[in-house]
Amino acid sequence: MARINRIRRKKRSSFPFFIIIALLLAGAGGYLYLTYFEGEKPLIAGNDLPEFIGKTTDLSLAISDIKSGLRTIKAIVIQNGEEKEILVQNFQKRQKDGTGGTAKKTIKFTIDTKALKLKEGDAVIHVKATDYSFRGFLKGNVTELFHNVIIDTKPPKVSIIHSEKYIKPGGAGIVIYKVDDTVKHGVMLNKKYHPGFSLNDGSDNKYISYIGLHYATEEISQATVFAEDISGNRTVKPFAPILKKPKQKTDTIRVGDGFLSKKIPEFEEYYPEMEGDMIQKYLYSNRKIRKENNQKIHDLCMNPGPKQLWSGSFIRMAGSGKAGFADHRTYFYKGNAIDKQVHLGMDIASTKHAEIKAAGTGTVIFSDYLGIYGNMVMLDHGQGIFSLYSHLSQINVSNGDTLDKGDILGNSGTSGMAGGDHLHFSMLVNGIFVDPKEWWDKHWIDVTIAGPLADAKF
């Protein structure tokens, strides 16, 4: 009886063992299934694919599969039922220790419509990615992307109606042209982009681009009108302005201790990082701060209004000219040359705290203190034309104000790097400082701008 009881106890004690084994096997099977038969598909990020494909179009796709790793990526173009292979990439399998394999990949490829013999019209970009999962009879999880596109390889048409025949360093002019089917167009002049703005409300696809040359220009290496459509097709038409180089003007500026003791504290208030003695701080202001200020002015010109607000010649302040545009200045301290800079405007002196008028109708885009320019106002006259008024003792306008030609915007003064009461006046075309004398000259305005504009509108 005792033996029978022992046998029964032995059978009962072995039962949990089989349960444990079964659970372990089930767990191992589940682990293997979840690891090798995981069902997470590769991810294809294709939200930025273009709608139009031009002659050659570069594409980029981010593809990932974190769990099993990427196996293959294939891209094709389908048009009229015919498949054109663009790209095939195969990836190595991840090792058991977790090394190797490819979890993420950014693929870049180019669709060359001529090489692929694609025709104008509809097409489909098909991208297929697989991973190393054992699912699908060991073929892995599959993700497919289908993206509809339009093949458009015809470039825009460009015709130049008027282009500048002569231009000088620091000079300005216009180019008038006609384009169709574009999203971006304008003029490239010595690698500088000058945007185009519509004439006649754009109803006839005619545009004007104001151009300006840097004062130090030695030659015109590039002068073209370009147009680019939504597919990236681009047309470029050259024009050939003749460069008329004026004689370089020079000037001498003598810096004294009295000037330094008056000006350096003003700059220290706005630029506390200045270090060294008076001369070192002066040179910091005349070099580094000047450069930063000119960059700020350039940046202010990068979002011009689309409409021409001004008309006729610009107003010149009454008074005597004290310094000219593009004067090459040498600065002396106690008989020694300490610096060289170029003056980018016209200095005009009248009575103390003289009223300063808007040279043309425009919108105030800056009305604050700016380093060497002191209290400064800038006006946007539309289509890339700007005027600048600095060294003011008082500013009477605010950003966003619209001023008519002749409206008072402030008073002359000595703020910034000014030794005596005067106005520093500048004109800019798309951020390039140009000679104000041209814009004060009615004949120049009529011949260079108003006349060609009137002819082009009809």
Image: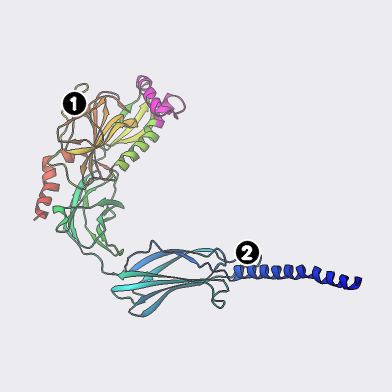
| Residue lying at 29% horizontally and 69% vertically, measured from the top left | 153
**Residue corresponding to mark 1:** 355
Is 233 one of the magenta-colored residues? no
| Image x and y of residue 168, in percent | 22, 46
Q: Is residue 453 left or right of residue 83?
A: left
Q: Is residue 414 left or right of residue 362?
A: right
Q: Is residue 116 visible?
A: no
Give the mark nearest the N terminus, 2 or 1: 2
Q: Report the label total.
A: 2
**Amino acid type for the residue under numbered disc 1:** Glu
As helix, strand or loop, the secondary structure at mark 1 comes to strand
> What amino acid is labelled 2 in the image?
Thr
Looking at the image, which is closer to me, 283 or 109? 109
Residue 139, above or below 169: below
Q: Which mark is residue 99?
A: 2
Above or below 429: residue 425: above
Quadrant location, the N terminus? bottom right
Does 13 appear above or below 303? below
278 drawn magenta: yes
Q: Which residues make up the magenta segment?
A: 257-284
Q: Quadrant of residue 113?
A: bottom left
Q: What is the distance, in whole Å, between disc 2 and disc 1 at their CAs?
A: 76 Å
The C terminus sits in image quarter: bottom left
